[in-house]
Amino acid sequence: MAVITGGARGLGLAMNQALVLSGAHLAIDAADNQARRLTELFSETYPGHEYDKSEFWYVSSKPESDAPVAKILSQHPAITNIITCAGFCENCDTIKFPSERVKRMLRFNVESVYYFATGIAWHMMEHQTAGNMVFIGSISGSISLVNNPRLKAECVLKIPQKRIGTPEELMGTVVFLT
């Protein structure tokens, strides 16, 4: 069983598709309004492949991460992989960024990854289950650079390929790592 956070769009969606096509069993974390759409997309696009229906898990504390892990384990014997793709950013003046928004972003982008990963690691160690964890922390290509052509142009100049990569370019790498 592979658990994927942030699975409804961008890198998370591409990782979901790659793992389904590779035969993995998935538990997908998707934003609440996207969970049903993602389930329908997978049912239509990949008939016959097994995956858990996507669900919304907003995790910003240890107890909030325990519930989805327990639910997955109640339906499957083991979790062997976690891929974290959930994250968000805000396009705003960094110097004037309100502290409450910074805290919210850190809870979601850092703490939720920690809680999910340690919860799954604890399970894997307790049951001596081998597995892999892949942590992905980039949302620049599809979110933060879209509305800022000047910043996007500056970033592209620093990339050896002189372009922003697509999520699909990482599909094989993540399948290999998991």
Image (spheres, grey):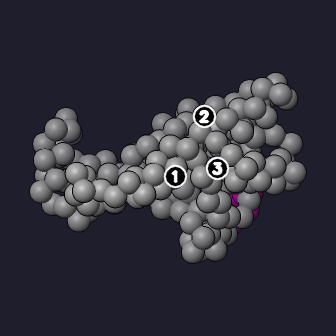
Q: Is residue 38 left or right of residue 161?
A: right
Q: CA distance from mark 1 to mark 3?
A: 9 Å
Q: CA distance from mark 2 to mark 1?
A: 18 Å
Quadrant in which residue 54 is drawn: bottom right
**42 part of magenta stretch:** no
Q: Residues within 10 Å of mark 1 (few under 14, many from 20)?
A: some
Report the magenta residues as a range: 44-51
List the residue tagged with mark 2. Answer: 133
Q: Is residue 163 left or right of residue 13?
A: left
List the residue tagged with mark 1. Answer: 108
**Percent position of residue 34, x then y:** 56, 71
Q: CA distance from mark 3 to mark 2?
A: 20 Å
| Residue 43 vs residue 89, the one in the foreground | 89
Identify residue type, mark 1.
Phe
**Percent position of residue 45, x then y:** 60, 67
**47 part of magenta stretch:** yes
Residue occupying the far front of the picture: 99
Identify residue type, mark 3.
Ser
Residue 61 is marked as: 3
Quadrant in which residue 80 is drawn: top right
Which-is-in-front pick, marks 2 and 1? 1
Q: Is residue 96 left or right of residue 158?
A: right
User: Which residue is pictured at 82% across the width and 24% down the height?
Assistant: 128
- In the rendered structure, which disc, 2 or 1, sits on the residue that comes first in sequence? 1
Which-is-in-front pick, marks 1 and 3? 3
**Percent position of residue 171, x then y:** 48, 45
